[in-house]
Every structure is written in C-alpha cells, then in structure tokens.
Image: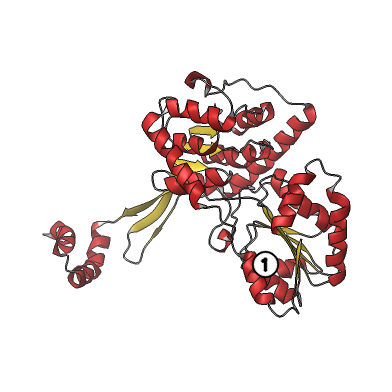
Amino acid sequence: MKTLRYDQPDFARAVTEACAASSLFDPQIEERVRGVIQEVQTRGDEALVELTERFDRVRLKPAEFRVGNKALKPPPELARAIAATHKNVVAFARRALRKDWSMRNAQGGRIGEKFDPLRRVGIYVPGGTAPLVSTVLMTVTLAKVAGCPEITVCSPPPINPALLYAARVAGATEVYQLGGAQAVAAMALGTQSVKRVVKIFGPGNAYVTVAKKLLFGRVGIDLLPGPSELLVVADNSAEPCFIAADLLAQAEHGSGHERVWLVTTSEKVLEATQAEIQRQIFKLKRADFALRALEKSGVCVLAKDIAQAIAITNQFAPEHCELMVKNPGKVSRAIKTAGAIFIGPWTPTVVGDYLAGPSHELPTDGAGEAFAGLTVDQFQRRTSIVELSRASLAKSLPMLKAFGEVEGLDAHVASAQIRFQ
C-alpha cells in the first residue's frame, strides 16, 4: 500500500491525487457499451442471445431468459441469515418511507405531497466471481416495502440458487438470467421477452455502470455505484488487526479497482496495520483479488491530528467509513460525505454489507459529496398537491398579477381573473 505522511513536502497534492475518483468511464468501455445498447434496441431478444453467449458463455433461448418461480431453500444457516437480514431491512425501510401530507399556505390554499410506488422497477444484481445474495435483499426488499407491484431482477447466468431464493423472499415478481450492459439495456428499452421498467437500481461493474449512465433519461437511475471503498479513521486506541481485516474484506471483491484507505494519527498503528495485512492476506481464499486491489488503490495516510484526518475523509468521500477513535460520536458528526459510517471497534463494515438494515448500495468515486445511498423513498414517485378555494384564490390574485406583469405573461393572470368576472 502507498504511504503518505503529513510532514512530506507535497502531502496535500499527493492526497488530492490519491483521492481523485478512479475513472469508470473509460472511452473504450463507453464506446463498447453504446454498441451493446444499440444492438439491444434494434434487435431485441436476438441481440440478448448473442451477447449472453459472447460475454457469459451461456447459450440461452429467449424463452429461457426468465427463471421459474421455484427456488430451492438453501442450507438452514443461510436461510436463517437471509430471514434475519430481510427482517432488518424491512424494519429500516418502513421507518424511512415518505408519507402523504398537507398544510395551508399563507393565502389559505391547501398544499402538500403524495407518494406513490413506481409501477415497475428493475434491479441489477452482480454475479461473476461473487454472487451477491445480500444485494438482492438490500434492493428488492425496498421496492417491495415501497409497494412496487412489478419488481424485475436481472443477474448473469447461471443464477446462483441462493440468490434466486433471496429474490423470492425479498419480493421479486420476475427474475431473468441476463447480465452486463445488455441486461441494463433490456430493462431500460424493453425487448420481446423483457418488459421495459421505469427505473433501474443496483450496483455493477464498469460496463453496467456506464450503461446506466448512458440510459439515464430514457429510464430512471438510482446511483452510479462502482467498486467498493473503505476508509478507516484511527487514532492510537485502534486495534491494527481489526483495521487490517476490514481493509482486506473490502479489497477482496474482485474488480481490482477497490479503494481501501487507513487515515491514522498514530505511526505505530500505521506500521502495525501494514504488518497485519501481510500476516492475514495470504490466509484468504481470494488473496490474489485483495492483493491486486491493495497494490493498485491501497493507501495509508499518517495525519497530523484528528482534524486533518477528518478533512481528508471528507475530501475522499468514502463509500464506507469506519471510526476507530476515542470519541467516535464527535468525529462522526464532523464527517459529511461518507455513504455510511460504522462507529467503534465492534462495528465492521461487513455488518452493513450483510445484516444491519440500511441498504449497502452506496455512492462511490467521490459521489458521496452530493449523493446519499439507496433508500426506500427512491422507489416512490412524489406528486405535488394544490387546492384553492374562491377566497384563497382571491387573496392570491395580487401576487399573481405582479408576477404576470413582470414576466409579460398576460394569459397567466387572465386564467385566474376570469373566475371572478
């Protein structure tokens, strides 16, 4: 891992360069994805058959895209884990649901909002080297709680049986064994076998993310989440073996673009953590994946003090932020850009990945400065409600006239005045 120290001459510049968002929008990838989208748009199912065979090396007929409703129950331990996570996600989502409301404005008119579930949504769930069963629960469940009547799931073939079971538990109404940019295009544009959705959710690789970016506007998009990120803020009270284990947990995902950072005020903790990583990494089944990510995007930062550590964290805007410091409550209040904050030594990121309740689909690549993670209200459509009486419209008329005159829109004013003639 690269090491940066606050007393080196070019420290600020080095941190800024390291914080710079990794490019998921490679021009070559974007060009390929445009081609995939065009193929799906013009040739529909025929293109999906060819692209699935080319990229996933699986030959499917259009009738085989959609997976049947039966899902084998996994081993008892996994079934209990799925049930526990589902329960926590449901409880959190119900608490976060937006509800209809109304009030009177200064002129006596009734104004408010109503919230309706999106009628048909699409969820992309990555497959590849790690079938993300947990992602199903962290996305589909929210759509179900919001009341979406049609919930489509796409995941690369062949779909892992546990992933299919989780989809049924969470409330999916359709599951398709389709992956990559072609799956996103199919959900956004529709084909003979895949009905178009109104909004697409879920993480994915660079091709999936670029497809979501290019199709934004043709269809609603939740976020553009890329490879996993973790930044640990630590002082001299932190336990290095905990830090090392948590960094490795995020580095093992497999894309090689994962970004894992330690920002600490203690040189002793920094050195001990690096030693712990060397000790732990080669015991992992996915050591090669973790090693590739650490060498490419792993950073250890020795900060001057906790204030500088907080400033660096807000500059990075990490997807996951762990606080292993003496006063984590105070530090958490000062961190404004993290996707999720995990407080104290007994809260590893894995509990957010798998169990806690909030969705683990979070902003990456610095997007946390402006975007929050996936929430249940993103599956709801907001509508403004306005209702005036004769009296409240009469009271509003002088203001309407003033705006109509300054903007030169006589018909606007006349549409209100005519009601009193």
- At a point 54% along the width and 27% down the height, the residue shown is 53
Question: Toward which corner of the image does residue 67 lie, by quadrant?
Answer: top right
**What residue occupies the far front of the structure in this picture?**
28
Q: Give me the residue at 39% from left, 44% from top.
A: 218
Task: Give residue 81's position: percent from left, percent from top.
Answer: 75, 36
Name the side, left or right, on which 150 lies relative to 96. Answer: left
Quadrant of the frame with the N terminus: bottom right
Answer with left or right where residue 70 lies relative to residue 46.
right
Residue 241's spot in the image, x, y percent? 87, 56
As drawn, is 309 to the left or to the right of 97?
Answer: right
- Residue farthest along the left direction in this orientation: 421
9 and 134: which is toward the camera: 9
- Amino acid type of the residue that numbered disc 1 sits on in the rendered structure: Thr
Does 418 sit left or right of 211 as displayed? left
Q: Quadrant of the C terminus?
A: bottom left
Residue that label 1 marks = 313
Q: Residues within 10 Å of mark 1 (few under 14, many from 20)?
A: many
Is residue 258 visible to the viewer in this orientation of the structure? yes
Q: Position of residue 159 (x, y in %)?
A: 63, 28
**Residue placed at 73% from the left, 26% from the top?**
74
Disc tally is: 1
